């Protein structure tokens, strides 16, 4: 039976365990270029035993960045910076991944430690785009320009170009960000998609942006490497995107060569009532896995070794992604192995061996 420290094969890639570093914004890139901060942040967690290390939401176009500090993959210089990091992650035994993203109407925001609100253009912000000219609201009041079909195609081409750069940079796991209220999720949800063309209205039209993007990226991304998508499996809001729709979408994405769904939730409306608690999104991963017959990752308030091991053992998800817990402890996998009495224990980097003997 699978458990937290069983290897996970997907296409020709094998994770050494089921523990991944969830993509986490560091807001520390300069013009989209990652640097020493990202090397140390991601590198420490690879050295700490993670099987998979997914770099933060990485914008496929400059206007798709959440903040001016977000990473990008619209230039070769950005790919070169990521390549250096990926070489280190691989040397530590982790599989390097990246999450490709476009923030849509939630772009052009200040970094969180400067308040996180939309930045006026005069203060380093920019004009935003989205499926429809509907603002997110609250501290993100900018009204985006509705993309026309040519604009949609340009964004999709940017996803493909970024995937090609990710490949050149040595990424071996690609995640399309279609969650947390960013552009692709904005297309999925009737709360943000008010279009009346073939990209809006019924389910088939609202999923078209992501399905087409996945298809185009799959063609550019090698068969030997996993392609995954993060979904907000529910908007937690009446009239919004639902878990039933996520299951149906997961089936379609599987048909497009998507290998795993990373199951998150929320983020598309400021008023959602989210039942936050330990492992609260795990049932979403479980339903998608069972009903769509696709591998899943569980994410969200997973902190304890036994909890993580149970998620995998019970078949609720194939992989667990930890976020804030990994900020508290980069060595979480090594500690978890000890707590779970894993035999043989995972081997720490030799430089740190005397601490784990
Ligand atoms: C937190 C968040 C989680 C779930 C729903 C909405 C928001 N994160 C999401 C991040 C950016 C920072 C805040 C991304 O997904 C890029």
Image (spheres, helix red, strand yellow):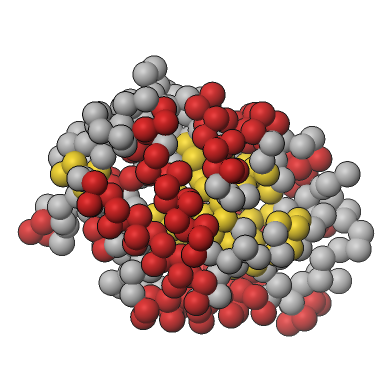
Q: Residue at image x 20%, y 45%?
A: 148
In this rendering, would 81 be left or right of 52? left
Image x and y of residue 255, in percent: 59, 43
**Residue at the limit of the structure toward the right, as seen here:** 343
- In which quadrant of the rendered image does the C terminus lie? bottom right
Q: Residue at image x 58%, y 49%?
A: 258
Q: Residue at image x 79%, y 58%?
A: 7
Image x and y of residue 192, in percent: 29, 32
Q: Residue at image x 49%, y 40%?
A: 231
In this rendering, would 347 be left or right of 103? right
Depth check, front residue: 161 or 357: 161
To which quarter of the image does residue 45 belong?
Answer: bottom right
In this rendering, would 160 be left or right of 12? left
Q: Is residue 212 visible?
A: yes
Q: Is residue 306 visible?
A: no
**Residue at the limit of the structure toward the left, as seen here:** 122
Residue 88 vertical position relative to residue 26 in the rendered view, above or below = below
Image x and y of residue 140, in percent: 22, 41
Q: How many marks?
A: 0
């Amino acid at each position: 039976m699978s458990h937290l420290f069983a290897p996970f094969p997907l296409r020709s890639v094998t994770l050494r365990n089921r523990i991944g570093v969830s993509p986490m914004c560091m807001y520390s890139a300069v013009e989209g270029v990652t640097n020493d901060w990202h090397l140390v942040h991601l590198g420490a967690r690879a050295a700490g035993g993670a099987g998979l290390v997914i770099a933060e939401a990485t914008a496929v176009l400059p206007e798709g960045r959440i903040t001016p500090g977000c990473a990008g993959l619209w230039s070769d210089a950005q790919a070169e910076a990521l390549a250096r990091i990926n070489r280190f992650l691989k040397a530590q035994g982790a599989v390097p991944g990246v999450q490709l993203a476009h923030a849509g109407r939630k772009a052009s925001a200040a970094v969180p430690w400067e308040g996180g609100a939309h930045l006026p253009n005069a203060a380093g912000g920019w004009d935003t785009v989205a499926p429809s000219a509907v603002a997110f609201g609250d501290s993100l009041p900018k009204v985006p320009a509705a993309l026309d079909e040519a604009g949609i195609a340009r964004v999709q081409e940017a996803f493909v170009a970024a995937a090609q750069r990710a490949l050149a940079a040595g990424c071996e796991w690609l995640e399309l960000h279609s969650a947390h209220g960013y552009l692709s999720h904005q297309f999925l949800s009737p709360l943000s998609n008010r279009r009346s063309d073939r990209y809006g209205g019924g389910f088939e039209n609202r999923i078209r942006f992501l399905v087409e993007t996945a298809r185009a990226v799959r063609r550019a991304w090698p068969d030997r490497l996993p392609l995954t998508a993060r979904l907000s499996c529910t908007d937690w809001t009446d009239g919004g995107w639902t878990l039933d729709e996520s299951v149906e979408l997961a089936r379609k994405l599987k048909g497009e060569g998507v290998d795993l769904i990373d199951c998150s939730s929320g983020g598309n409306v400021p008023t959602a009532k989210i039942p936050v608690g330990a492992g609260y999104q795990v049932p979403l991963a479980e339903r998608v896995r069972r009903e769509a017959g696709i591998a899943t990752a569980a994410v969200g308030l997973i902190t304890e070794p036994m909890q993580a091991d149970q998620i995998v053992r019970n078949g609720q998800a194939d992989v667990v992604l930890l976020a804030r817990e990994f900020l508290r402890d980069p060595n979480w996998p090594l500690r978890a192995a000890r707590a779970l009495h894993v035999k043989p224990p995972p081997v720490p980097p030799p430089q740190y061996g005397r601490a784990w003997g």
